[in-house]
C-alpha cells in the first residue's frame, strides 16, 4: 500500500484564461483537505488594463452575484473587494497576456461544490467560472 507523505507537493492544476473570457478548466475534483496549486496563465493579445484574469475560489454559500458586483468596483485592489474577504478561500493576482500567477491552497474539508471565477469586470457574466468539487 502506497501512502502519500504529509510533505508531498501540492497537485498542480494548469489553467489558461483567454481573450474569450473563458477558463480552459471548468471543473476540478479534489479530496477533502488535498493540497492544490492552481497555475493560471493569461493568453491573448489585449493589454492588461483591457483584459486580465485571476482565479478566485469562493466559500460554499457565498452569494456569487453580490460578490461579483462588489468586485467590479474594487479596481484599486485588483477587483478583490475587501468587504467580501471572508468569502474567499483562495485567490491569485490578476494576470495580463503572457503572465502566469499561482496560488497554493488546501481544498475545503467539507464535501460539496465551490465556485471559482475571474473577478475582472464582465468576465464572470461571460462565463469565466468553474467549480471545485470536493468529494
Image (cartoon, helix red, strand yellow):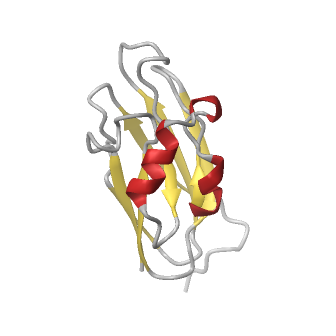
Q: Is residue 95 visible?
A: yes
**Up/down of 6 relative to 95, above or below:** below
Q: Quadrant of residue 102?
A: top right
- State the quadrant of the C terminus: bottom left
Q: Is residue 127 left or right of residue 94?
A: left
Q: Point out residue 7 in the picture as x, y percentages from the top left corner.
A: 73, 67
Which residue appears at 44% of the width and 46% of the height?
69
Q: Residue 114 or 120: which is nearer the viewer? A: 120
**Up/down of 25 relative to 123, above or below:** below
**Up/down of 64 relative to 134, above or below:** above
- State the quadrant of the N terminus: bottom right
Residue that protrudes farthest toward the right in the picture? 7
**Number of numbered labels in the structure image:** 0
Q: Residue 66 or 117: which is nearer the viewer? A: 66
Q: Is residue 19 left or right of residue 12?
A: left
Q: Quadrant of residue 36?
A: bottom right
Q: Point out residue 129 in the picture as x, y percentages from the top left corner.
A: 34, 50
Q: Point out residue 107 in the picture as x, y percentages from the top left corner.
A: 55, 69
Q: Point out residue 48 in the picture as x, y percentages from the top left corner.
A: 49, 18
Residue that protrudes farthest toward the bottom in the picture? 1
Which residue appears at 26% of the width and 29% of the height?
20
Q: Residue 96 or 34: which is nearer the viewer? A: 96
Which residue appears at 59% of the width and 46% of the height?
81
Q: Is residue 10 visible?
A: no
Q: Residue 6 or 25: which is nearer the viewer? A: 25
Amino acid at each position: 500500500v502506497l501512502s502519500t507523505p504529509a510533505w508531498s507537493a501540492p497537485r498542480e492544476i494548469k489553467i489558461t484564461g483567454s481573450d474569450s473570457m473563458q477558463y480552459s478548466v471548468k471543473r476540478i475534483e479534489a479530496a477533502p483537505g488535498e493540497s492544490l496549486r492552481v497555475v493560471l496563465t493569461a493568453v491573448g493579445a489585449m493589454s492588461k488594463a483591457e483584459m486580465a484574469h485571476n482565479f478566485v475560489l469562493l466559500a460554499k454559500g457565498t452569494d456569487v452575484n453580490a460578490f461579483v458586483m462588489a468586485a467590479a468596483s474594487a479596481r484599486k485592489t485588483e477587483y478583490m473587494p475587501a468587504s467580501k474577504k471572508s468569502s474567499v478561500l483562495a485567490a491569485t493576482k490578476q494576470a495580463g497576456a503572457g503572465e502566469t500567477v499561482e496560488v497554493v491552497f488546501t481544498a475545503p474539508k467539507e464535501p460539496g461544490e465551490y465556485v471559482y471565477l475571474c473577478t475582472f469586470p464582465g468576465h464572470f457574466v461571460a462565463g469565466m467560472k468553474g467549480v471545485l468539487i470536493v468529494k
